[in-house]
Amino acid sequence: MSTPLRIDFVSDISCPWCAIGLSALEQALSRIGSGVQAEIHMQPFELNPQMPPGGQDITEHLAQKYGSTPEQHAAIRETIRERGAELGFVFRLEGRDRIYNTFDAHRLLHWAGESDTVPAGRQQELKKALLRAYFTEGENPSSHEVLARAAGAAGLDAQDALEVLGSGRYTDAVREREAFFTGAGINSVPAVIVNRKYLISGGQPVEVFEQALRRIAAEPA
């Protein structure tokens, strides 16, 4: 018998460790197989909620935010690229030189998770399409055209996606969820919350996710 698990994946489109964490989480669930029945919900978190239209040069941004040098930034990006490659996720270093506002991407993800017209599981596929658009293709995730294209790649209706993006729908709902998770103490991502009780922080290796999920699933109901 499968053990049901609710997994809230709190993350941002502009977070490379979130791409790593989601890939590792999915592989961990694949290893566990029929032992658990996971229901994954993508939850919003903005690393840079004040990012202006047009974004900012990523090296300049990281220097301002963390005090890192271009050399340190290059070393971290290489580490991230290698971790991604181990999991089958491609981080394209060339061309991805800006960081953008991601609020509209979170609105689109909310639509994919809440709308009765969207098939189950498409929200997770949309999340992966958005991560690929930014980290692999080097596209601008604040562009409605890019977001709609990602929706189409995830099996959603691109025209419906454009309508959602142009309407401003789900703005309040996304703000409320962001406030809920930051109010609960989430200040870095990815944050993987299992059964609304257990927290697994960061882009952990597959083995760490697998061990944690097996342990949680084995606990008495």
Image (spheres, helix red, strand yellow):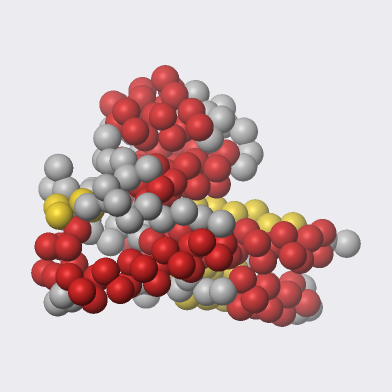
Q: Quadrant of residue 3?
A: bottom right
* Residue 176 seen in render: no
Which residue is at the front of the view, 40 or 146?
146
Which residue is at the front of the view, 199 or 210?
210
Identify the residue shown where x is 30% and y is 51%. Answer: 94
* Image-based side of 129 in relation to 56, left or right: right
Identify the residue shown where x is 69% and y is 62%. Answer: 29
- The image shows residue 137 at horizontal and vertical percentages of 37, 43
- Say which quadrant the C terminus sits in: bottom right
Taking 106 as reference, is 84 above or below it?
A: below
Taking 135 as reference, is 217 above or below it?
A: below
- Say which quadrant the N terminus sits in: bottom right
Q: Quadrant of residue 24?
A: bottom right
Taking 139 as reference, is 155 above or below it?
A: above
* Image-based side of 177 in relation to 67, left or right: right
- The image shows residue 39 at horizontal and vertical percentages of 65, 54
* Image-based side of 5 in relation to 136, left or right: right
* Residue 155 seen in render: yes
Of all residues shown, which one is farthest toward the right?
1
Identify the residue shown where x is 46% and y is 67%. Answer: 82
Of all residues shown, which one is farthest toward the top?
159
* Image-based side of 56 in relation to 218, left or right: left
Which residue is at the front of the view, 105 or 24?
24
Q: Quadrant of residue 64?
A: bottom left
Which residue is at the front of the view, 26 or 197?
26
- The image shows residue 163 at horizontal and vertical percentages of 36, 23
- The image shows residue 141 at horizontal and vertical percentages of 31, 42
Taking 115 as reference, is 128 above or below it?
A: below
